[in-house]
Image (cartoon, grey):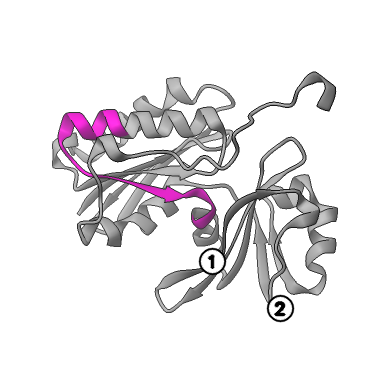
Amino acid sequence: MRILAFDTSTEYCTAALWLDGTLTSREIHAGQTHSQLLLPMCQDLLAEAEVGLAQLDGITFGAGPGSFTGLRIACAVAQGLAFGADVPVLGVSTLLALAEASGAERVIACLDARMGEVYHAVYRREECDWVTDSEPRLCAPQQVPAVAGVDWCGCGSGFKAYAEALQARYADALVNIRPELYPHAREIARLAAPHIKAGQGMAAELAAPLYIRDKVALKICER
């Protein structure tokens, strides 16, 4: 099975190619240049593996939450590539990708959403799958949902931007904090693989980003 994956939801631009369980990937700190970097990264991966777009079983992307512009770029590229090659598309939660990257069994995934807020979700691994305890949401770091029990891993840029507030909120529930983690195409490919194999991909025109925030900038009076 061959899957092309990518993510542009944060300042990083990442791409990965899944070939029957073997992953190769590319990543770069892109800043605001995702639209210039993503296609060449994907083309490089495919050329190195000598795989054409039409030979793919699916294309998957980080659907969000994340940067408004970044989510639009990833979705548009996924749609364009998939439509031309007639392959299915699957969007994957960026917060779930964080949980997968953590290597932990109980994860509080938290991305810095700017404007004093975070994108937040809570997951538990059960056997080979993830269970969602708290759905992705946008909230102030002081108002993130509580979790039951201990041994939770906190991961993502939210734990760097709002470290004091989040650690106070979760007190002794956290056993580990991984603020350096960010959504990556590697984990998006891993998460998507069983769903694409099961035929759960969608037509290119049906793919859509996961927007949680409507307002993307503060007014002058709010700054």
Q: Specify the amino acid type for callout 1.
A: Gly
Q: Which mark is residue 150?
A: 2
Q: Is residue 20 left or right of residue 54?
A: right
Secondary structure beneath label 2 = loop
Could you classify mark 1 by the number of other residues whose Cα lies within 10 Å: few (under 14), some (14-19), or many (20 or more)?
Answer: few
**Which quarter of the image is occupied by the N terminus?**
bottom left
Ranked by sequence position, the earlier of labels 2 and 1 is 1
Q: Residue 115 at x, y = what percent?
A: 74, 35
Q: Residue 41 at x, y = what percent?
A: 37, 30
Q: Is residue 109 above or below residue 57?
A: below
Q: Nearer the viewer, residue 89 or 221?
A: 221
Residue at the image point whose x is 70% and y is 49% from the top: 139
Q: Is residue 223 visible?
A: no
Q: Specify the amino acid type for callout 2.
A: Val
Tell me, yes or no, whether the highlighted magenta stretch contains residue 163.
Answer: no
Front disc: 2 or 1: 2
Q: Is residue 203 left or right of residue 213?
A: left
* Quarter-of-image position of residue 218: top right
**Which quarter of the image is occupied by the C terminus?**
top right
Q: Is residue 35 left or right of residue 138?
A: left
Q: Nearer the viewer, residue 138 or 5?
A: 138
Q: Residue 110 at x, y = what percent?
A: 65, 53
Q: Report the Cα–Cα distance between label 2 and label 1.
A: 16 Å
Q: Residue 209 at x, y = what percent?
A: 44, 39
Residue tagged 1? 103
Q: Nearer the viewer, residue 121 or 106?
A: 121
How many marks overall?
2
Q: Is residue 177 left or right of residue 34?
A: right
Q: Which residues are magenta?
A: 79-96
Residue at the image point whose x is 40% and y is 28% from the top: 38
Tell me, yes or no, whether the highlighted magenta stretch contains residue 85.
Answer: yes
